[in-house]
Image (cartoon, rainbow, N blue to C red):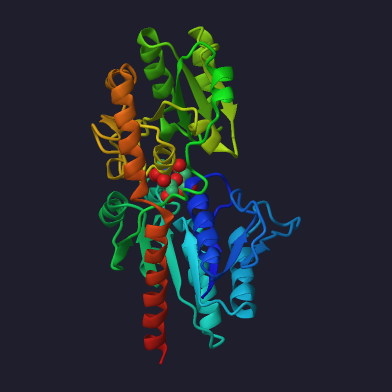
Amino acid sequence: MNIGIVCYPTYGGSGVIATELGKGLADKGHNVHFITYNRPARLDSFHANIFYHEVRVADYPLFEYAPYDTVLTSKLVDVIKNQQLDILHVHYAIPHAAVAYMARNILKAQGIHIPFVTTLHGTDITLVGQNEAFRPVVEFSINESDGVTAVSESLKRDTISNFSIQNKIEVIPNFIDFSRFTKSDKDHFKKAIAPNGEHILVHTSNFRPVKRVLDVIEMFQIVNTEIPSKLLMIGDGPEREKAEAFCRQHAMCDQVRFLGKQDAVEELLSIADLFVMPSESESFGLAALEAMACRVPVVSSNAGGIPEVNIHGETGFLNEIGDVKSMAVHAISILKQEDIHQQFREKAFARAKQFHINNILPMYEDYYTSIIQRQQVAVS
Ligand code: GMT
């Protein structure tokens, strides 16, 4: 198949999944065309079947806000036509689903028929999409998509309850590429971070309010009184300053390290003993799954789709949102005994394997095939 992929090229979960999906499809012999405003962060090596089309928004004195959607639409029309794409897959509804709708209709007027699939990832439905500034366009373009997928049952439910949806939503969960996310021997690294054998807790996110990064630090503060530990905060975003200030005020700077955005997250996860995800809203929790693939148990909130990934009492523990004390108690219960910690590690790994890319990728291939066939029947 010739497949077009539109996504945010950043470190965000939707861009990561879109890029890993494209790479996986290319490995299986499909031609994959990424159409984005920057090279996707995870598109880090050459592949004969992968093509990258950059969307460049021209500056013009009249524009206070350059019309990115229009430029992306024109680029899609060009790529679909000239690369003879069979299907277009857009990740994160805003603005990609509306742009895909426009491109499809422009091409239809020229006698070219291309279906598009929209994958809903999370905040496009649970947060941003509910803002009246986006809602009508999100709802319309979901209903007009030729196929719609959601990354969890929870996100599917949220979509149906928050919008008026006539289209069928298929759940295709996120996945993990074990050739990248696997526990490797980084003992020298561990000794540098935790020279006295302290436990290492890790949090990764974009530090947006929805991630509740202060909960991570408050929870760590309790854990550290009972079990000497270190905390690695990976990522960057609006709440980072507040979190750093909290650490300074509470004299925790020796125990908490803010590492900023990191490419090789799997190396840091390899030295982690516990992953912390206290999010207020999380459609899936890809970062938790990445940790589990590296044999790291997860202490998390019970928000959204997290319970579909993290199994309470097996791969880690689920807690009420904001219940920092319960998270700390659960973290201590995992870390204080080596044999229990080991059991959680193994179960986290086994659970992660169920989301192996080899299990999930065929679901997308089958879905594309069914959407293309349905469209061919409709056109003939
Ligand atoms: O808000 C983020 O964390 C980024 C966002 C995205 O779309 O880039 O992540 C969402 O999509 C990920 C991949 O499907 C999911 O694993 C995250 O749970 C989801 N984030 C939220 O729902 C807050």
Residue placed furthest toward the left: 313
The front one of 155 and 152 is 152
Give coordinates of residue 135: x percent, y percent.
39, 55
Residue drawn at 37 percent across, 34 percent down: 279
| Along the line of sight, the residue nearer the viewer: 38 or 307 | 307
- Quadrant for ligand 1? top left
| Residue 310 pos. (x, y %) | 30, 39
Among the 4 quarters of the image, the one containing residue 323: top left
Q: Quadrant of residue 288?
A: top left
Question: Between 161 and 277, which is closer to the camera in this rendering?
Answer: 277
Q: Is residue 189 above or below residue 92?
A: above
**Residue 162 at x, y percent in the picture:** 29, 52
As rendered, which of 91 and 163 lies closer to the eye? 91
Question: How many labels sit on residues?
Answer: 0
Q: Is residue 2 above or below residue 89?
A: below
Whether residue 323 is visible, yes or no, is no
Task: Identify the residue at image location x=48%, y=46%.
Answer: 13
User: Which residue lies at the image location 30% right of the left edge and 35% below the top edge?
Assistant: 315
| Residue 380, picture quadrant | bottom left
In the rendered image, is residue 133 in sight? yes
Residue 183 is situated, as x and y percent measured from the top left of the image, at: 47, 37
